[in-house]
Image (cartoon, rainbow, N blue to C red):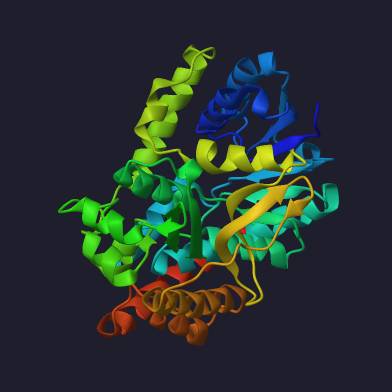
Amino acid sequence: MKGQLTIIGGSTPFTAAFADAIEARGEAVPPRAMMLNGRNPRSLPIVARYVRNRLSRLGWSVDWSTDLSTALSGSEIVLHQARYGGNEGRQEDEELALACGVVPDETLGPAVLQSALRMSPMLDTVCRVIVKECPDAWVLNLTNPLSIATARMVQCGVSRCIGVCELPRVTAQKAAAVLGEDLAQATWSYAGMNHRGFVVGLSWNDTDRIAEVARRLGRKTLDGIEPEQITDLGAIPTKYFSLLRGDAPTPALGRAAFLEGLRTRLLDELRAHPEQSPPSLAQRYLAWYPQAVVPLIEALSSEHPMLLEVNTPTHRGLVEEGRAPVSSAGVGAFVPAKVPSPVQYWIDRFIEHERYLLDAVEHPCPATIRRALAADPLVAPGNLDNCVRLVRTSLNHLQARMRSEKS
């Protein structure tokens, strides 16, 4: 049996989908001792019982603890999926974004800044425990905003931290499906940042077929991406590009409330039938487990490198997204990607915004907040003053509440 795998945020019932994804891979993923850690002492044993039922026949052992130090002690791999502030915090972020007139998404727009500032002190504490209890562990981060959270963990000394997202691979798979091809037989490249990236090469038999994807789409879209956008970019952006361009309708408020209700239903199902996969899992997109997390765990357990999509620090001092070889020896450098000039324009904008975001999280003040919002592609110049006012007011309330909770 391989060494221990610990899940921080393991009390969420969505962890059931992770167990299902491991079970689906069978013996391809070597068994480990799994430790679930979470803040909810009522749901944690319910989730752990389900995971044990799914994975024990494959040789996995499963335990749980609400104590973070106990859960992390000696871990080789840590899956970090905690939601700091819970769904209540996500609701606040959605409301702030809508008040600013932008998309209520936890990875884009003004909500990112508020979410990152709320998360920062709690995440720093978690990082200190990781560094103390398992300094050499590979930490796979799923917590959003993913690039900011991953960068913060690296800054706090979690040197083997990898941001994990399925979207690059899913985007390439959908493009391959348009062509009637198998992505496994393709040579493809990717560049950008989490949720702000592009498939910049997609070839079979040394022939790039990105332009053909646009032609084959006709009047259809690829996850909301218009064929004209693919043609203009010379690349295939992830689905969030339409939101960044303002081409997609603003989603309605209520994602946080939906997830909270779904969480309750899942716990009821797990409690009543711990031997079967809860039907309500189908109501949420959870492809990051089978498409990204499980392949990464498989690669880190093997001597043979696998080319996977990861978010890691680069020479620019930012966490960027790309394809790299992964094995038990570690994570290699990104495979070079040739970036068309229209794509580089957007990547440069994202890089500038990310730098200012990190500065605002590290040194929150009126000047850094304004600079980060001014660089945000979602914030129109004419709406900047209003966004700054709303964000500062919201952050003042957040900081006051955090001080009150400490005292």
Left or right of 386 on screen, residue 15: right
Q: Residue at x 44, y 21 (%)?
A: 278
Tell me which corner region of the image, top left, top right, bottom left or bottom right, holds residue 148: bottom right
Q: How far from the left and from the top, in percent, is residue 96?
A: 35, 64
Q: Nearer the viewer, residue 340 or 273?
A: 340
Left or right of 204 on screen, residue 32: right
Q: Nearer the viewer, residue 94 or 162?
A: 162
Marks counted in the figure total 0
Q: Is residue 176 visible?
A: yes
Q: Residue at x 42, y 50 (%)?
A: 172
Q: Is residue 104 visible?
A: no
Q: Nearer the viewer, residue 121 or 228?
A: 228
Left or right of 247 on screen, residue 400: right
Name the quadrant of the C terminus: bottom right
Work out which residue is located at the far front of the displayed protein and give it: 205
Q: How far from the left and from the top, in percent, is residue 72?
A: 77, 41
Name the quadrant of the N terminus: top right
Q: How far from the left and from the top, in percent, is residue 220?
A: 19, 51
When the figure is inspected, residue 92 is found, relative to residue 275, above or below; the finding is below
Q: Residue at x 43, y 46 (%)?
A: 170
When the figure is inspected, residue 96 is found, relative to residue 65, above or below; the finding is below
